[in-house]
Image: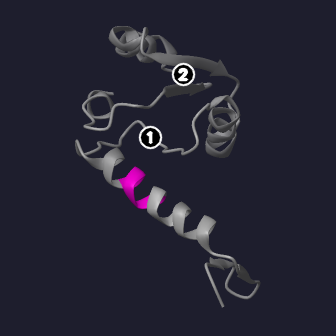
Amino acid sequence: MNSVFGQTFRDFEVIVINDGSPDAAQLEVALQPYRTRIRYIQQENRGLAGARNAGVRLARGELLAFVDSDDIWMPDYLSAQVEFLTTILAFVRRSRTRCFSVRVRRWYGGC
């Protein structure tokens, strides 16, 4: 959590999904210093996809970033990601023609 809250980009929300962890008590102790800055959700174990989908449903932002318990972000990680994604989204929105290649499943801004 220190690397998340140590970001240079500050406009974000944090949702922590406890996906049926057997270490829930330890997790809650570790999260205590951050409780006023996070949304903490407990659910039965639904696996990685179930936990991420729960977070997606609760998220209020336009962009999402996933952090697993063993991840550490560099201080400019979110800033760099937001800059990149904002540039890509602006390009796609400006593009009048969008082609979808079923074979490689990629979006292209133009043909």
The residue that mark 1 highlights is 68
| The label number, if any, that marks residue 22 in the structure image | 2
Residue 21 in picture, x, y percent from top left: 55, 25
- Could you tell me the amino acid type at mark 2? Pro
- Main SS of the magenta part reads helix
Q: Which secondary structure lies at badge 1?
A: loop
Residue 85 in picture, x, y percent from top left: 47, 58
Q: Which secondary structure lies at badge 2?
A: loop
| Of residues 101 and 86, the one drawn nearer to the viewer in this rendering | 86
Judged left or right of residue 15, residue 34 is left
Is 29 contained in the magenta span? no
Image quadrant holding the N terminus, namely top left
Span shown in magenta: 81-85
| Residue pictured at 47% horizontal, 56% vertical | 86
What's the distance in space between the residues labelled 1 and 2, CA to CA? 16 Å
- Could you tell me the amino acid type at mark 1? Asp
Judged left or right of residue 91, residue 72 is left
